[in-house]
Amino acid sequence: MAAVSLRLGDLVWGKLGRYPPWPGKIVNPPKDLKKPRGKKCFFVKFFGTEDHAWIKVEQLKPYHAHKEEMIKINKGKRFQQAVDAVEEFLKKAKGKDQASSHNSSEEKNRRNSSEERGKQSAGDEKRKAGLSEGKLKKSTGEGKKRASSVSSERGSKSPLKRALDLSPRKRGRPPKDEKDLTIPESSTVKRVMTGTVAGFKWPPGVSEPAVCYQAITKKLKVCEEETGSTSIQAADSTAVNGSITPTDKKIGFLGLGLMGSGIVSNLLKMGHTVTVWNRTAEKEGARLGRTPAEVVSTCDITFACVSDPKAAKDLVLGPSGVLQGIRPGKCYVDMSTVDADTVTELAQVIVSRGGRFLEAPVSGNQQLSNDGMLVILAAGDRGLYEDCSSCFQAMGKTSFFLGEVGNAAKMMLIVNMVQGSFMATIAEGLTLAQVTGQSQQTLLDILNQGQLASIFLDQKCQNILQGNFKPDFYLKYIQKDLRLAIALGDSVNHPTPMAAAANEVYKRAKALDQSDNDMSAVYRAYIH
C-alpha cells in the first residue's frame, strides 16, 4: 500500500501481516503501549473485531477512497460484518451531526422570532408613551425596552440553557458535559480524541460493564449465577479505560507452544513483566529463566501451558521443577488442558508447600491466542483469580470462575469434546458430498447461510478445500481431549457414543501420520 496523509480519527483500510486489508479507525493507543521504533505508524482499532495494532503508514489506505476496491476483493462473512459496522458508525455520526445542526437552527429561529416580537412590543409602547411629557416619555420608553429585551431572552431559552449561561466559563469553550464526542468522516476530522474511543460503543441493548467487587474495579464485567460460578468478561482496553493497567506482580510463564507463545506476546504488549522458560526457544522481549524452579522462585505468579497430563506433572514434579521453587505465597496457574485428577493432584502438592493454585485452561486456537481473544476457564483459589485479572484481560476476551479445583478441567474437556466431534462431522459431510457428486464449496456456502454458520466452520472447511492443514490446533491434542472426555463420562457412568465414534476417526488420522497437522486433517481419515 502506498503511503498517505492520515491523522487521528481517520477511517482506514489496514493491512496486518498475512490478513487481507480490514476497515478500522486510527485511535489513541493505550498509555502503556509504546510506539514501535522505525517507520511511521498509527494505532488502529479494527471494526467487527476486538483487534487493534500498530500499523505502518504504508500499510494504510483511506477508507472512503478505496471502499469499492476492497469490497470487490474481499467476500468473507466477517469482512462484510466489519464493513457493516463501519457504515453503522458513519450513520450514527451523521445523525448526531444533523440533530446538532437542526437543534442549532431551531434555537436561532426561536431567538430571532422572539427578538422581532420584542422590537414590535417596544415600538407599541413607545407610541403609547409619546402621549406623555419629555422625561416621563424617555423613562417609560427605556423601561419598556429593557422589559421586552428580558422577555425576549426568556422566551428563547429553556431554564437549563439559562442556568448554563449564568455559570462561569471561558468564552468559546463548552462545559465538559456538552462536548460533541462524535468523530466525523475520515477526511474531515477536526477534533483530536483522547480517553474513551467514542466510535466503539457498547452494542444496542447491552449495558456497560457493571462492577461487583473491588479487586477488578472498572476492568471487568462480572455476572454471578445461582451455581456460584462467575463469568468475567475482559472489557476492551481502548473502549473502556484507554488501557489495561498491568499488575505490578512479576509474572512467569512456562511453555511457549502454539498457545503459550501468543499468550506471552499479549502479556508483554500490555506492559507486564514476564520471565519465561521453554525447552526449545526464548520469547523476544521476555526475560529467560534457566529452569521452571528458578522462574517460580523469582516470580509472584507463574503460568504454565503444556500439552498433556504427563507434561503437566513432569513440569511440577520433575527435576528442577515448579515444586522446588514454591514457597509460601508463591502462585501457580496451570493453563494446560488435562483431566480433573491430574489438576487436583498438582493443586494438593502446590498448596502443601504453602503455595496458591489456580487451574485456568483456555478455549481457543493459535490465532485466538495471538489476538488475545481466548476464553479462560478458571477454578481454585478465588483470590488468585482476582490477582490475575490484568493478565486474563491481556490474553482473553472472557474468563469464567467455576469454583473448586477440577471443575475447569471437566468443563474444558466437555467443550473440546463438542468441538472435536463437530470437526469430525464436518469432515464426514464434505467427503460424503464429494463421493455423491456434490460440490464441496456449495455445501460450505449453504452451511454458511444457515444456523450452523460460524468462524470455526468456515475456517476448517477452507482448510480442507485448500488442502492446507497447517496447525492452528494440533490433531493429536484434540484426540487427547476426546479420550479424556470419554474417560470422564466413564467415571460417572455417562454414555458418550458420539465422542467415542469421533475419537476412532481421529485415531485413524493419527495412524495416517496427521498428528502434527491441524485438527481439520481428520478429513484425510475419510479419504484413505
Image: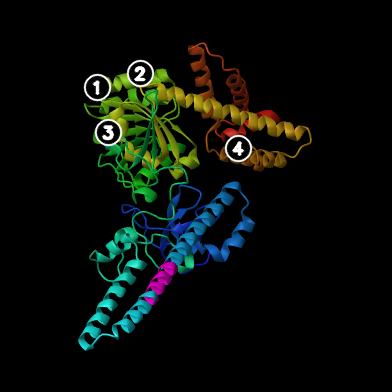
Q: Are marks 2 and 1 in contact (CB under 8 Å)?
A: no
Residue 265 disc label: none
The disc, 3 or 1, on the residue closer to the chain's N-terminal end is 3
Q: Of helix, strand and loop, which one carries label 4?
A: helix
Tell me the distance, in whole angstroms, between the alpha carbons under discs 3 and 1: 16 Å
Amino acid on which disc 2 is placed: Glu
The disc, 2 or 1, on the residue closer to the chain's N-terminal end is 2
Residue 295 visible to an observer of this rendering: no
Circle 2 Cα neighbour tier, 10 Å, few/some/many (<14 / 14–19 / ≥20) = few
The disc, 2 or 3, on the residue closer to the chain's N-terminal end is 3
Tell me the distance, in whole angstroms, between the alpha carbons under discs 3 and 4: 42 Å
**Residue 270 drawn above or below residue 59:** above
Q: Are marks 1 and 4 in contact (CB under 8 Å)?
A: no
Q: What span is in magenta?
A: 104-116
User: What residue is at 53 percent from the left and 18 percent from the top?
Assistant: 486
Which residue is label 1 attached to? 353
Q: Of helix, strand and loop, which one carries label 2?
A: helix
